[in-house]
Image (tube, grey):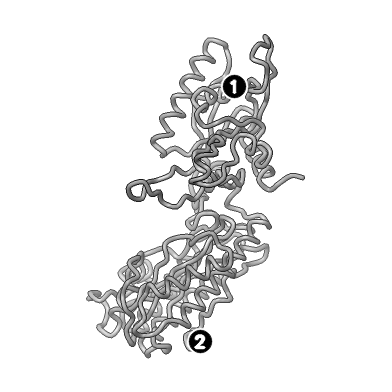
């Protein structure tokens, strides 16, 4: 039976063709302090292609490589050759280290459990990689990992020197995965969407519990704690990103992370948090009153952001671009800012001049998938070589997250609005005829939010 991982590898190999190899590297481990490491999370590409979640791993996909069978008799003058599509370099089995750090699959497990045609210990990479790359014209590789960049370039140089003597092909160019693999990751399969729906359902439960718990006198970290507990309790491996729990003026800080303020009566609380399930992320923001009910001015701002978000979501369908969606959100927000007396002038001219930017400074959405800001090109070339915004297609998942932020020092806003921050964010799947809101179960209207805050 073909696994989703094997099917993904076959699709990648068919895309890159017979003369291109591909190399993917596990996330490097990082020291947190002294001899304690940060929690390990596998590189998304490595997991997408194999489901393997151990560090010190390198994947090499080779449509046309031939290497010596490591199990062959070394005395054999004509050893058996392997033509592996997937070669994995992994940590060796080590009973002593496994006592300390846990089970390792090792070389045999890479083959029997994860579909490798050939597997070696990671210390053989330097010797084996040049022969795997020989015979290929190009290598798919995401450069930027300085330590591994040097190793790959050394292997390419060795392959080129050897090929020059033998009259064989050798890599002369690198291909960014955005051109091949990321096109595949951008469109989600039914299995991937099942994981994302589960992540969204767990996240919904966490947000509802946080709304019910919030009250003046509680601390932001108490809400963060109930979110994380809910995520883990329902099988999520981890939060998809560092949770933002900002109350009062902290709600106006886009990437606020301290989460240590004590909530006060009259505060709004902005929570931007989502879990990861099966290596797929959710990304949700809700804003609600700590005391359970919006003040009049808070309600005005909240309903304007909600109006912009609903208008933006309603636009989603194949053929529309994220730029179109952002433009719609900006238009609605600008109309509302004029209505509230925060901006003055002709709305169309204000939109064109981006007069909303002091209060709405980010885009309305991004790709969502294995990474919370997922891979995939936002612009694509036309037949005449021009770059245009990419039209949405079925199977793509995006966030839609307009907001308004009036910092306590926002001199361009009337004083009654200062200290108010509102963002509302949902995860939206593009379907054949429109969209599916994967996070619609989380309270969002004023009435729903106030009921949720009342528990």
Element at label 1: loop
Q: Where does the N terminus fall, quadrant-wise?
A: top right
Q: Nearer the viewer, residue 82 or 269?
A: 82
The reply, left or right, for residue 417 in relation to residue 111 is: left
The location of residue 263, given as percent across then percent down, is 33, 81
In terms of image quadrants, where is residue 301? bottom left
Residue 410 left/right relative to 89: left
The residue pinned by badge 2 equals 455
Instruction: Classify 151 as above or below 7.
Output: above
Locate residue 426, reporting x and y percent.
52, 70
Please report the residue visible at 57 percent of the width from the left and 33 percent of the height from the top. Answer: 60
Residue displayed at 42% across by 33% down: 149
Q: Quadrant of residue 434?
A: bottom right
Mark 1 / mark 2, whichever is N-terminal? 1
Q: Visible in this render: residue 32?
A: yes
- Image coordinates for residue 193, horizontal then vertical, percent: 64, 60
State the residue position of label 1: 135
């Amino acid at each position: 039976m073909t696994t989703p991982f094997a099917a993904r590898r076959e699709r990648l190999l068919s895309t890159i063709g017979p003369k291109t190899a591909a190399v993917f590297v596990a996330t490097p481990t990082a020291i947190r302090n002294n001899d304690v490491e940060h929690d390990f999370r596998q590189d998304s590409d490595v997991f997408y292609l194999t489901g393997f979640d151990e560090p010190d791993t390198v994947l090499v996909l080779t449509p046309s490589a031939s290497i010596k069978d490591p199990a062959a008799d070394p005395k054999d003058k004509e050893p058996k050759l392997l033509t592996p599509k997937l070669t994995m370099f992994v940590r060796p089995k080590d009973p002593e280290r496994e006592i300390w750090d846990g089970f390792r699959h090792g070389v045999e497990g890479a083959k029997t459990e994860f579909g490798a045609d050939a597997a070696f210990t990671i210390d053989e990479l330097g010797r084996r990689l040049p022969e795997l790359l020989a015979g290929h014209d190009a290598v798919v590789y995401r450069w930027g990992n300085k330590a591994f960049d040097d190793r790959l370039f050394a292997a390419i140089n060795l392959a080129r020197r050897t090929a020059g003597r033998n009259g064989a092909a050798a890599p002369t160019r690198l291909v960014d995965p955005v051109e091949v693999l990321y096109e595949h990751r951008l469109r989600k399969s039914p299995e991937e969407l099942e994981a994302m729906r589960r992540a969204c359902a767990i996240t919904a439960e966490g947000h509802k519990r946080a709304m019910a718990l919030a009250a003046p006198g509680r601390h932001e970290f108490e809400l963060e704690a109930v979110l994380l507990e809910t995520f883990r309790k329902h099988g999520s491996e981890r939060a998809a990103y560092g949770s933002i729990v900002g109350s009062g003026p902290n709600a106006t800080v886009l990437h606020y992370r301290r989460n240590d303020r004590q909530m006060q009566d009259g505060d709004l609380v902005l929570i931007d948090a989502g879990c990861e399930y099966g290596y797929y992320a959710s990304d949700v923001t809700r804003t609600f009153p700590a005391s359970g009910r919006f003040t009049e001015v808070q309600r005005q701002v909240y309903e304007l952001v909600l109006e912009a978000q609903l208008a933006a979501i309603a636009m989603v369908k194949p053929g529309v671009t994220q730029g179109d969606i952002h433009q719609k959100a900006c238009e609605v927000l600008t109309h509302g800012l004029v209505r509230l007396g925060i901006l003055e002038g002709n709305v169309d001219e204000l939109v064109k001049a981006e007069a909303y930017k002091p209060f709405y400074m980010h885009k309305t959405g991004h790709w969502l998938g294995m990474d919370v800001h997922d891979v995939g090109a936002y612009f694509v070339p036309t037949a005449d070589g021009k770059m245009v915004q990419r039209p949405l297609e079925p199977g793509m998942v995006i966030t839609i997250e307009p907001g308004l932020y009036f910092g306590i020092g926002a001199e361009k806003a009337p004083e009654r609005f200062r200290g108010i921050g509102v963002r509302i964010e949902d995860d939206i799947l593009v379907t054949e005829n429109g969209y599916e809101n994967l996070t619609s179960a989380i309270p969002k209207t004023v009435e729903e939010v106030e009921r949720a805050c009342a528990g």
